[in-house]
Image: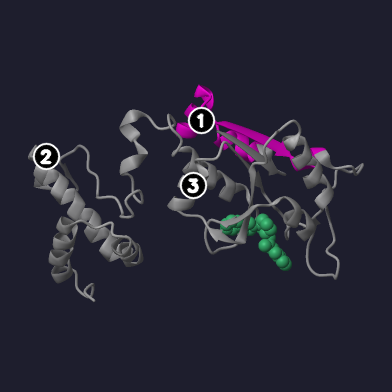
Amino acid sequence: MIFDVMTLFPEMIDYCMHESVIGRAVKKGIITVNCFNIRDYSTDRHRHVDDYPYGGGAGMVMQPGPIYDCYADIMAGKETKPRVVYLTPQGRIFDQPLANELAREEEIIFLCGHYEGVDERILEEIVTDNVSIGDYVLTGGEMPAMIMIDAIARQVEGVLGSSESAANDSFQDGLLEYPQYTRPEEFHGMRVPDVLLSGHHGNIDLWRRRQSLKRTLERRPDLLEKVRQSGGLSAEDRELLAGLQEEVPGSGQ
Ligand code: 9WO
């Protein structure tokens, strides 16, 4: 899968995409991250890419010309039009279903804005998806683009090792993960739950499922409601939840 990133700070993306799990996938050739410096497409002798906003007001706005030329360069020789994602607080909220959907694309182009924004006309012309990673304002779209690439890439076949399989994570079944423990058996007076030391896999699976349900009920009741409504709970889940609802104060409805 190919990710093309249009940005004023390509080093920021380049560096991060060569580390860790994503870095390994890049080395293996399963994913490719191409960074394009919008400034390279400036026609200004001072390499400017921004100008004052028409109508007045604070700050600077990225001009459409260099972004268009950068986009045209990326598109040169392509037969199909990849989706173009603009990272903006005004977009659709990025979540696991959107990550899964985008992981089925062959190529995605990201446009990272900076300053006080980007001229509306280039957004109208090239952007297919306005996406937000959450309700806060940042200084640019680079970190949101990296977050999206990370979440999308790890859904691509071969990116995770067999032991890291994406199928079991938080959100794949709409519930939060159960708590994890490793050695030592006792840390600062706190013991690993006995069931995990028992070697009884049936009991371990049941305990973990119950913990996932409990966490989701306590921390993200909104997610639990979504799973419930989409029919994602088994009869056993509903039984476990009924038990939990007595135990967790204020969680019953
Ligand atoms: C800043 C500003 C200051 C004065 C008047 C208007 C203004 N608009 C902005 C602004 O929204 N700047 C953005 C900064 C321009 C596009 C890139 N920036 C950005 C992206 N901030 N936050 C995001 C973002 C993207 C995805 N998900 C969450 C936040």
Q: Classify 55 as above or below 234.
A: below
Label whose residue precedes the other's in the sequence (3 or 1): 1
Please name whichever residue, 247 or 86, is drawn nearer the observer in this view of the structure.
86
Q: Nearer the viewer, mark 2 or mark 3?
A: 3
Q: Which mark is residue 101?
A: 3
Q: Quadrant of residue 216?
A: bottom left
* Dominant SS in magenta: helix
Left or right: 205 with respect to 158?
left
Model colouring: one colour
- Is mark 2 in CB contact (under 8 Å) with mark 3? no
Q: Nearer the viewer, mark 1 or mark 2?
A: 2
What residue is at 49 percent from the left and 33 percent from the top?
22
In the image, the segment drawn in magenta is: 11-40
Residue 236 placed where, x, y %?
15, 56
Secondary structure at numbered mark 2: helix
Q: Quadrant of ligand 1?
A: bottom right
Please name whichever residue, 33 or 83, is drawn nearer the observer in this view of the structure.
83
Identify the amino acid type marked 3.
Glu
Circle 3 packing at 10 Å, graded few (<14), some (14-19), many (20+), is: few
Residue 16 placed where, x, y %?
55, 37
Q: Which mark is residue 23?
A: 1
Residue 135 placed where, x, y %?
53, 64
